[in-house]
Image: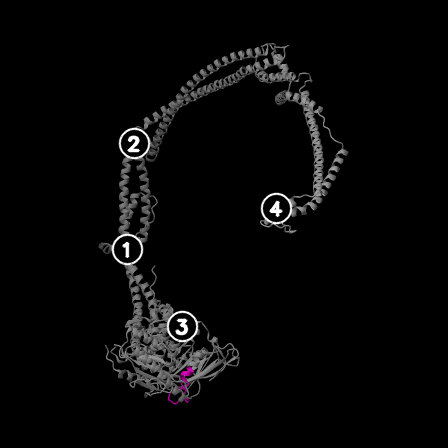
Amino acid sequence: MIKLGRIRIEGFRGIPGLLDVDLSAPITLIYAPNGVGKTSICDAAEWLLTNSIKRLEESAAEVSDFRCDFAASDVPTRVTVSMIAYGETLEVERLLGSCRWRRNSDVYKAVSQSDFLEALAPSAVETNVHKTHANHSRQIWLRGTRFLSGDSLAALLESDSDSMGNRERLFADMLGVGHLIETERQLEIYSKHINQYVKQQTTLIENRRLALRQRQASLDHESRENEKTLLPHSLAKATEALNLLHVDDIPPVKPEPSVSDMRRMIAFLRGELERKKNNWNERRSAEISLAADWPSRFILTEQQSVDQEKSRELTEKITQITKEVGHLREQVEANELERAGQTQSLISDQAIFDNLKNGLAIVSNHLNTYTKLLPERSVFSYQDVVALSGEYPLGRAFQSFLQLAGRTRSDVPEILREGEELRVLRSVHVSLPSAEGKQQTENDLAAAKLRVASLHRDHERIAGPIEQLRHLSASIVDMLTHAEQCPVCAHNWGSAEALRQALNTARKAESPEIWQLASNLEKAEAEVRRLQDELDSYETNVKRATEIDAKISSLEARRTAFFERFDSLGLKVGTDLSALLDGLYAKLSFIFSVRPLLDELSRVNVSNLPASLPIIDYVSQASTELQQRMNEAVAQIEELRKNSATFQLDLERRTRTKSDAEREQVALQQKIENTEFRIHKLRAGWRVLGGERPWTSDILAELSTQLLQENSELLLTEELIDQAERLMEASANLDEISKLESELAPIEAERNRLTSYALAAEVARKAYFDMRQQHVRRQMEEFVRVISALFTRMQSNEVYDRISEGDASSPLSWRAISEGFAMNPDLRFSQGQRQDFALSIFLARARGLGGTFFMDEPLVHLDDLNRVALLDVFRAICLESNQKISIVLTTASKATLRHFVEKFTYVSRDGQSQHTPLLRVIHLEGNPRAGVSLRY
Amino acid sequence: MTKFDPQQAIQLIDDFAVAVDFRRGTIEHFGNAPEVPDASHLWTSEYAQILAVYSHLTEFDIRQNVRNGQEWLDVLCMNREQEFGNVVDAYLVILLNEEPSKQLQGIVREIELDPTACRKHFVWPSNAEDQELRWSRIFRITVLGLPPSPESSGMTNTPKLHDRTQIEVLDDIKNLKPANAARKHGEQVRPAPRR
């Protein structure tokens, strides 16, 4: 049992100065916010006991990293503790790089790591275990059983393969078998590597054995007995083959050659044999190629000469025909060219003829119209018409002139009518008043209107009220249906009817003044109307006079324009405008119609006709002459067509003849080439077979016999070489077999040596495994009951009934039992359940071991009821353990601190409260920069 | 069905209660608290009180016993707190003569999770032959002591190896690490390479 009393920490991790902590109470609760140094106290204890801090080792921290960065330079990095280890009182001081102790109040002495760890974990390590391994095992055991850190808990909560491996090692450490597992693991690694060497040797042996089997299988029984004679026999066979090959340049041969010598000689022989066989095959192929045409070799050469002569003749014939065909083609083309020219001329003459014929009738009509207007002249000759046409411009200018004449001619009747109208208009007279008279009338009208207005106002002023009274009295009369007395003067009229009649009479009576006013008003209004009519009449006359002037101006302008046109036509105004214009228009129309005829006549070569002929006769005779010329052209064209047909027939016939000759030439050329190839083949074959010797049948027979003989020799030579090679290979095989047999033995010995190491490792690993399994099973049987009780009481929400150990095949495993079913905690437990489970194992182990245990933040992931249950468990463990156990806990939770205080303050181990409390609370304050202090 | 022997359960509770400084107490009658059956059992200490009450397997009985038991414990704890001046925990144990039905187990779980007044635990025998396993639910009572953990001498021994090669292998593994040890053994003697 290892029980720590006070621990003094200086310049270590998060503690810059000195911190003296009493850990002797059954429960020491270190409370501080994060970063004040809770974990540093746990780390200091771990460093002191194991000379390492596992969580820092995993992050590759150096020992120098253990020193507090904020420690003063004169403060050492030191942890001192007073402790009881297995009944012995120890004072231990650990500095960076050294450790010393004082045993049972003796003086301080330096202590080695091995001695110190042996004192803390004295059991277990055998004498034959190296110190390094023993130290490592003891470190693992101390750490696993004494410290439960946040990192350890985190490893318990994760499910990846690395974490599961870590968890298994942690459980193994808790159960005291971590060192066995570590050794097993190292033996497995060793086995894996040593088996690689064994496998290499096995592969070497198998390869050699396979080669040996293959060589032994190819060796016959006699070979081994005749081992000494194999190479001489091989040499004899090779020499015999060499003689048969008739080689001039023979390589030197030793009298007692080695296998290599024979291998080189056989290679030489095979090269020579191959060369000879190639030469023989070439001549044999030549002999075979001669066989087909050999009997007809002379006929072929004669036939070749005949065919070549025939080919030359055919070539000359084709050349001649080609020339004739060319000449004929030229003739055909010239004939066709002439016929096309004739045809084109005929078409042109026909068009002229048709135009003359059509135009003649039109011209006759216009000429008649024109001559009727000219009684002094009825005949116009060709030359007259040409002269007449020459008086006027050509083209569009003449057309415009003709259109102007036509329009002027059609305007004559209108011009005559407008002249009459102009004369009438000039005779019209419109009377108009003077300006003064008009002004007087306008003044009178204004005065009359003023007078009417004045009379109207007077009349309204006097007659208006009387009229209103009349309306009123009419209304009263209508109402007086039964009254007989006057409503004004009360005169009684005797009856209602009399009263109404009297009143109506009075109402209708008119004043003479009003009557006079009305009469004057009517007269004044009549005067106004008269004066207004007078003014209106005046305006009408002015308007009419203006219109007559405008009309006269318009007519005069039109007449002026007409006579200007008349002048432009070259006419003089006479008495009969219509006659003048009709004559001009008939003349122009005649000229317009005759001009196309004159153009056509100019295209007809009729110079022999007299120009004095009347134009009509002239055109008729020209047409007749043109007709005759056309008939001659038709006959000529027909003659040319017949000539073309004749040339064409001749051309086709010559072309066919040429094609026949060319085909014959092609066939003959092919025949010549074929014959040439056969002759060449014969000559080439003979050159290979007979060289320059004449190609007679006797010499061919002699050469064939020689080939047969050479073939026999070559076959025999090849057989001899094969025999020599077989003998040489048999000798070489025997050498190799001897060599392989000699190599195999040391490799097998080496493999056996390595196999012994592999077997030793496996046996050792099995021994460690068996011991571990046996120990774990025993441990598990004892532990499982406590673990199950701890776990179930921490599980307020009941899911699992109890915990049991795994089956015999995996002794480091656990099962959670629920309703009779066993489940794997690794797969089924939640994070909180895993933490509860890990705490259960740790506490069960701690109860068995006794001493001081460190638990860094063990309640972080627990729910409220679980936390309450765990506090009960801590309390129970401390009460029941009879001062065997001390637990150092850290927390950053104020609520957890209060809860601990409530649960533990008035509890004592011996039942005497207030004297020896179970719980000691240590408050840490400050930080690594400012310094860390504590208060209880 | 397992025969119900309440004395077994009471004896087990007693054993584990005494281990954590409880002693048997007598059932008192308080005027301001409901009566609890005389057959009930009380364990008392300076820091906590445990009351064990029998109940029939009916919801009514269970709820009535729980209600009466926790009110009774409440009054008792108040009296104790006035007497000692510190907080006193209370634990109510309901003893059932057999495993409740599924329906009743739901009610049991609901009551056990209810933190009102005191911690509640239900105990009934299971079908296991082993007596401790049969009354394993007693181990769930958080305030009681625990079954003894086995005494341990710490780390177990390592196997004793006598074979010379095995000892050599282990020594080399520990001196050189496994891969280096294998390399040393594998390369000690190598056959001459083939010409």
Task: Please name the residue that numbered disc 2 is placed on.
Answer: A292
The x, y position of residue A562, in whole percent, is 67, 23
Res A154 label? 3
Q: Nearer the viewer, mark 1 or mark 3?
A: 3
The x, y position of residue B88, in whole percent, is 39, 85
Figure quadrant of residue B17: bottom left
Determine if marks 3 and 4 fall on one subunit. yes
Task: Please name the residue that numbered disc 4 is placed on.
Answer: A498
Q: Amino acid at mark 3?
A: Ala
Q: CA distance from mark 1 to mark 3?
A: 69 Å
Q: Which tag, 3 or 4, sits closer to the chain's start?
A: 3
Tell me: residue A354, above or below residue A41. above
Magenta stretch holds residue A905:
yes
Q: To which chain does the residue with label 1 belong? A: A
Q: Nearer the viewer, mark 3 or mark 4?
A: 4
Residue most extreme to the front: A494
Q: To which chain does the residue with label 2 belong? A: A
In the image, the segment drawn in magenta is: A900-918
Q: Nearer the viewer, residue A313 or B92?
A: B92
